[in-house]
Amino acid sequence: MPEVIGSTQHCVLVGLMGAGKTTVGVALSSRLRWTFRDSDDDIRASTGLTVRELGELDGVAAMHALEADTLLAALAAPGPTVIGAAASVVDDEACRRALADPRCLVVWLRAGPELLARRFASSDAHRPDFGGPPEAVLADQLLARGPSLAAVADVVIDVDILTPDDIAARVAEALASIGP
């Protein structure tokens, strides 16, 4: 069984759509031998629908409420886990309080709107459609969510020029620095 590092039970990756939470989460969980929980995958497993389909069917507010519930359930589960959280969780007060738990290491994968837009455009159709050019939408989201992301983050990693393995290594180093 993989061991927790220090008192850390969960490493939560936060950031906007396209920041690399899933890709880095898979690499990090493999490196640590921790379970990986991805918000989109957990939601699809529980509802049978993608996040995009949920947003279209029930509306964005309901989709975000489910994303918040999904994070809270992942944090309530036994660790150690790496969790790729939906970007919207920082808009939810209960999620921000849960992320402040000292058993969580919260890592903001910070990326510029240009990189996010490139990844958004090349991704599959599971992401919600917010209308408008992706770079403008993501720049607006960064402006709106940036302060909350910064407030919950224990570690900030600028990912624009790093590979997923480089990012996973930096997160693993941050976890190791916590120590027993």
Image (cartoon, helix red, strand yellow):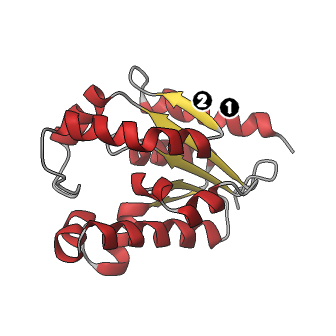
Q: Amino acid at mark 2?
A: Arg
Q: Amino acid at mark 1?
A: Glu
User: Which quadrant of the figure has residue 156?
Assistant: top right
Q: Are marks 2 and 1 in contact (CB under 8 Å)?
A: yes
Callout 2: few (<14), some (14-19), or many (20+) C-alpha neighbours within 10 Å?
some
The residue at which mark 1 appears reads as 173
User: Which quadrant of the figure has residue 59?
Assistant: bottom left
Residue 173 shows up from this direction: yes
User: Which quadrant of the figure has residue 110?
Assistant: top left
On the picture, is 104 further left or further right than 86?
A: right
On the picture, is 101 further left or further right than 116?
A: right
Q: Position of residue 74 (x, y in %)?
A: 56, 68
Q: Residue furthest top?
A: 161
Q: Residue furthest bottom?
A: 47
Q: Nearer the viewer, residue 99 or 59?
A: 59
Determine whether 110 is above or below 27 in the image.
above
Which mark is drawn over residue 170?
A: 2
Does dot 1 land on a helix, a strand or a loop?
Answer: helix
Quadrant where the C terminus sits is top right
On the picture, is 33 further left or further right than 60?
A: right
Q: Nearer the viewer, residue 133 or 80?
A: 133
Instruction: Report the residue at 30% width, 39% height from top.
Output: 140
Label 2 vs label 1: CA separation? 5 Å
Instruction: Report the residue at 19% width, 52% height from top.
Output: 130
Instruction: Report the residue at 27% width, 78% height from top.
Output: 48
Determine whether 36 is above or below 111 in the image.
below
